[in-house]
């Protein structure tokens, strides 16, 4: 660094020559006198010669300044200036470079910049002959921390990815101490993710002590990504809290509410007050629409912390209320339903029947699709309604009953336990027993983890007949061991009994906050499913297996090998990490969401400046060092030309330009200077490899006015020629079999050409191609969001890597993963038997190419695709991505007269025919959408199947 600028010199000692500028100025002050033209007649030679002695004239100030500037620029150029040099983290020793990379969730938005910085640091270590120790702070202490070569370090770096949990560099300290004991570090670079806290500060201080004389280079991001926490489904709106770094400048954000199908239901703004780090976002939607929200995410933030997953616990339940108490109308403030309304109104939508007749009230509430039905002191349900109520419970409903005088007298059999006749009075004048306090909650019930209040007492209760199953059915009990709450599963639903009233006549439980928490826990599992063993999801013993997890970018991915199941009772208190990443746990129809940020989470930025001396702090950058010598030499040459022209004018040489020969020579020199390239990229900077640019109107019109199949130019001549020949053969097949008459195929540069002209792009994967940069990735994302489809073909099915139900590890597959890592890709699945692709034009059950057996992958379709009353999918139901390994282009490739260029494997003419039919179905699918899914086509399809 020089004067705070990112400028360094490879030969700084040359700058000492700048001290000679005053001497040069003194020498340049004078210039020889201008020569005079005199006539030379032979007869007057001696008379006209002046005998006065001339003295030198002073040089013009601007000419002196020009020459001083020329000298200064030459000195700077010889000193080897470098703009944006890499930080020098070495301390003079030859030890390894410690490259510590934070790959927690806050590193995801700037992940590409981190990789570029890390690769340049590895390049510097390689030039200095240092080995490299690569440590990822979110990958746990089990990783190998041995110094390795630069090539192996690059491979290790490419295998890293941002995780969906917080970085824990403190876990690396034991392994780093062991590595330092074996070989002291020669350079340390910490690529920080910006997140701070006490563990991060402790790690930084310990690392500084371990470094000794070695300077530590810390790279910091410019900002932390925003986070999302604290989802609540209140009476009027679903709310959440957006958090950010306190040091960020004020800017409003937008939060999207997305359903299970990936459709955006609504967007709401989050407006931050000046200096505030939190802002509330509200979705004021109807309850039915709010209950469809499955995911909230901060728009524009590609990070796991900017996502909050919503499961059944956040669904706002519809609760029906029934009471058998006669005081309900006469004294409503003392009635049991009053306490239930006050407890449930903030968390549920309440429904009450118009009629007091149970025979009419129960069917009325069931028809309103209530999730939970609360019955206060109803002893007997009418026989005509008991069967309907039992069927409702078996279908997944939750029936919650409260005791009372009616239930103490007699009851039906829709209760979890057998009850004794009459009630048990405690603490009365005729009773020896004292009121019993609430002492505990069962670990097998939904109340597990609730704090036991010390002020709740029960004065009267209905008793359960003791039997062997009573302990398993008890969710809450009193000090004497008698149950306060019991429950029983009936198929997919539950029957829950409070052995006290819902008002304060038998206990003071309805006056406590614990009563509200107990009812909320019951609502949370009201949609739970019951396993075959009879133990429902509401049981704390149930272990939920990982189903769909979030990666560091906030996208759903399949569970990895390290992910472990979680128990229902522990999921709210689990800190997401390597064993329990954030995501969905359970099964498709009964799952729980584990979110990264908790309601009390904060974003604290790491303050590296507080570490004192021995630390260099820099920001990430994607641009590398720039050698400025060439530019300075060009400027010096221009100044030298300007100086020569000035001397020519001052010396009268401009008169030569008036002569034809002199003018021609000057023009020739200027032309040569103008034609000299200033850098290695001057030739053909506006032309692509095919001699055209995006702005070429002729090319654009040619691409628009004629339907053409397009392929991505990879730079590999053989692959590109195969793609062209393959799409040419498919185009001729389409022309002969369909009404489509496509033009010749065209190759596109994915980073330069306009992609929206083409509904389908065929992209053969070249394992040696470079990964698209961030700008190109954004272009690809925009193309797919706009309705375009890309067919990725790894062409590696012959190795058997894609036929195992997933993607293998061939070089082409690894390159495909690298390309897709930066894209917003939906969940994928093999083409289902009833997919539109199987019947878009031909009826197909497989999609072979040159190879057969590989799956064709498309966007996963939800189990239910009912989008009535909802926005239509972008692209009319067309998947934005198709992935195959069967090498379609080689199977389609023909020469100009139609002869195949490559044999199929196995050599079966029918396989080539099926490959062409697969291509026709893919093209028709991308051009026409999902219209073949309409029921109107069923008779024609059945007729074709009959043939």
Image (cartoon, rainbow, N blue to C red):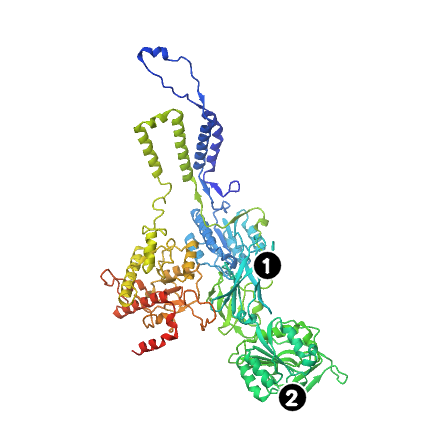
Q: Residues within 10 Å of mark 1 (few under 14, many from 20)?
A: many
Q: Which mark is residue 410?
A: 2
Q: Do callouts 1 and 2 mark residues in contact (Cβ within 8 Å)?
A: no
Cα–Cα gap, marks 1 and 2: 55 Å
Residue 350 % position (x, y)? 60, 75
Image quadrant occupied by the C terminus: bottom left
Q: Is residue 112 left or right of residue 764?
A: right
Disc 2, SS: loop
Residue 185 visible, this orientation = no
Quadrant of the image occupied by residue 881: bottom left
Q: Which mark is residue 278?
A: 1
Report the residue that reaches farthest toward the left.
897
Q: Residues within 10 Å of mark 2 (few under 14, many from 20)?
A: some
- In front: 499, or 657? 657
Disc 1, SS: strand
Q: Which mark is residue 681?
A: none
- In front: 30, or 655? 655
Residue 590 % position (x, y)? 51, 74
Identify which residue is drawn at 40% across, 37% down.
634
- In front: 183, or 436? 436
Total numbered labels = 2
Q: Is residue 924 left or right of residue 53?
A: left
Residue 524 % position (x, y)? 57, 73
């Amino acid at each position: 660094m020089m004067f705070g600028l990112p400028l360094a010199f490879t030969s700084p000692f040359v700058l000492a020559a700048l001290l000679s500028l005053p001497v040069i100025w003194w020498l340049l002050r004078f210039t020889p006198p201008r020569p005079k033209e005199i006539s030379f007649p032979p007869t007057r030679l001696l008379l006209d010669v002046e005998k006065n002695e001339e003295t030198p004239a002073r040089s013009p100030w601007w000419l002196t300044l020009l020459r001083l500037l020329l000298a200064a620029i030459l000195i700077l150029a010889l000193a080897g200036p470098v703009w944006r040099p890499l930080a020098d983290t070495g301390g003079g020793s030859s030890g390894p470079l410690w490259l510590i990379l934070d790959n927690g969730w806050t590193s995801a938005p700037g992940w590409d910049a981190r990789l570029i910085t890390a690769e340049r640091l590895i390049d510097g270590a390689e030039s200095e002959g240092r080995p490299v120790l690569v440590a990822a702070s979110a990958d746990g202490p089990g990783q190998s921390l041995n110094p390795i070569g630069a090539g192996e370090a690059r491979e290790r770096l490419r295998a890293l990815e941002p995780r969906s949990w917080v970085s824990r560099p403190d876990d690396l300290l034991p392994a780093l101490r062991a590595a330092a004991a074996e070989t002291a570090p020669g350079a340390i670079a910490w690529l920080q993710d910006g997140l701070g806290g006490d563990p991060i500060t402790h790690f930084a201080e310990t690392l500084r002590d371990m470094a000794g004389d070695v300077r530590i280079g810390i790279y910091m991001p410019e900002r932390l990504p925003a986070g999302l926490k604290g989802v609540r489904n209140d009476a009027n709106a679903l709310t959440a809290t957006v958090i950010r770094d306190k040091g960020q400048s004020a800017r409003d954000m937008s939060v999207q509410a997305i359903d299970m199908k990936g459709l955006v239901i609504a967007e709401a703004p989050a407006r931050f007050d000046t200096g505030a780090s939190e802002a509330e976002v509200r979705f004021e939607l109807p309850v039915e629409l709010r209950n469809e929200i499955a995911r909230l995410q901060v728009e524009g933030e590609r990070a796991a912390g900017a996502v909050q997953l919503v499961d059944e616990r956040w669904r706002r339940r519809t609760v029906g209320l029934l009471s058998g108490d006669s005081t309900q109308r006469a004294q409503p403030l003392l009635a049991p339903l009053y306490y239930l309304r006050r407890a449930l109104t903030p968390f549920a939508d309440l429904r009450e029947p118009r009629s007091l007749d149970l025979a009419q009230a129960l069917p009325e509430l069931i028809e309103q699709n209530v999730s939970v039905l609360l019955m206060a002191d109803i002893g007997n349900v009418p026989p005509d309604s008991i069967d309907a109520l039992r069927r409702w419970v078996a279908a997944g409903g939750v029936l919650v009953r409260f005791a009372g005088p009616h239930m103490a007298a007699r009851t039906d059999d829709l209760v979890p336990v057998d009850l004794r006749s009459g009630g048990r009075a405690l603490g009365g004048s005729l009773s020896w027993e004292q009121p019993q306090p609430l002492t505990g909650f069962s670990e097998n019930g939904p109340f597990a983890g609730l704090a036991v209040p010390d002020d709740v007492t029960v004065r009267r209760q209905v008793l359960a007949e003791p039997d062997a199953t009573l302990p398993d059915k008890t969710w809450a009990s009193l000090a004497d061991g008698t149950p306060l709450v019991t429950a029983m599963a009936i198929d997919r639903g539950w029957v829950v009994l409070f052995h006290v009233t819902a008002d304060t006549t038998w206990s003071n439980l309805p006056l406590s906050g614990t009563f509200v928490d107990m009812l909320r826990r019951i609502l949370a599992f009201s949609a739970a499913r019951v396993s075959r063993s009879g133990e429902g999801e509401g049981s704390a013993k149930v272990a939920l297996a990982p189903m769909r997890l979030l990666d560091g970018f906030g996208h759903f991915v399949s569970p990895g090998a390290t992910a472990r199941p979680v128990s229902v009772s522990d999921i709210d208190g689990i800190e997401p990490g390597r064993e329990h990443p954030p995501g969905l746990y359970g099964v498709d129809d009964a799952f729980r969401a584990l979110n990264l940020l908790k309601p009390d989470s904060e974003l604290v930025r790491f303050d590296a400046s507080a570490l004192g001396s021995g630390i260099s702090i820099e920001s990430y950058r994607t641009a590398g060092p720039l050698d400025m010598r060439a530019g300075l030499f060009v400027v010096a040459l221009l100044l030298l030309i300007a100086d020569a022209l000035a001397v020519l004018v001052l010396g009268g040489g401009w008169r030569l330009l008036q002569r034809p020969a002199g003018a021609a020579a000057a023009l020739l020199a200027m032309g040569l200077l103008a034609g000299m390239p200033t850098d290695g990229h001057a030739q053909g900077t506006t032309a692509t490899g095919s001699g055209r640019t995006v702005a070429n109107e002729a090319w654009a019109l040619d691409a628009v006015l004629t339907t053409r199949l397009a392929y991505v130019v990879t730079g590999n001549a053989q692959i590109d020629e195969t793609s062209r020949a393959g799409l040419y053969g498919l185009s001729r097949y389409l022309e002969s079999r369909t009404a489509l008459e496509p033009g010749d195929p065209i190759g596109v540069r994915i980073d330069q050409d306009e992609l929206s002209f083409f509904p389908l792009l065929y992209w053969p994967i070249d394992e040696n191609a470079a990964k698209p940069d961030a700008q190109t990735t954004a272009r690809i994302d925009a193309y797919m969001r706009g309705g375009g489809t890309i067919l990725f073909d790894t062409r590696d099915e012959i190795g058997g890597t894609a036929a195992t139900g997933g993607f293998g590890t061939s070089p082409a597959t690894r390159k495909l993963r690298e390309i897709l890592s930066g894209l917003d890709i939906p969940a994928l699945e093999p083409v289902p038997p009833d997919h539109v692709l199987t019947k878009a034009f031909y009826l197909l059950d497989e999609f072979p190419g040159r190879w057969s057996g590989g799956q064709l992958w498309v966007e996963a379709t939800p189990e239910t695709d009912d989008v009535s009353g909802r926005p239509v999918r972008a692209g009319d139901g067309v998947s934005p991505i198709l992935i195959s390994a069967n090498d379609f282009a080689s199977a389609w490739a023909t020469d100009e007269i139609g002869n195949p260029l490559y044999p199929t494997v196995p050599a079966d003419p029918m396989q080539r025919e099926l490959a062409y039919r697969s291509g026709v179905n893919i093209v028709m699918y991308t051009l026409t959408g999902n219209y073949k899914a309409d029921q109107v086509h069923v008779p024609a399809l059945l007729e074709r199947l009959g043939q």
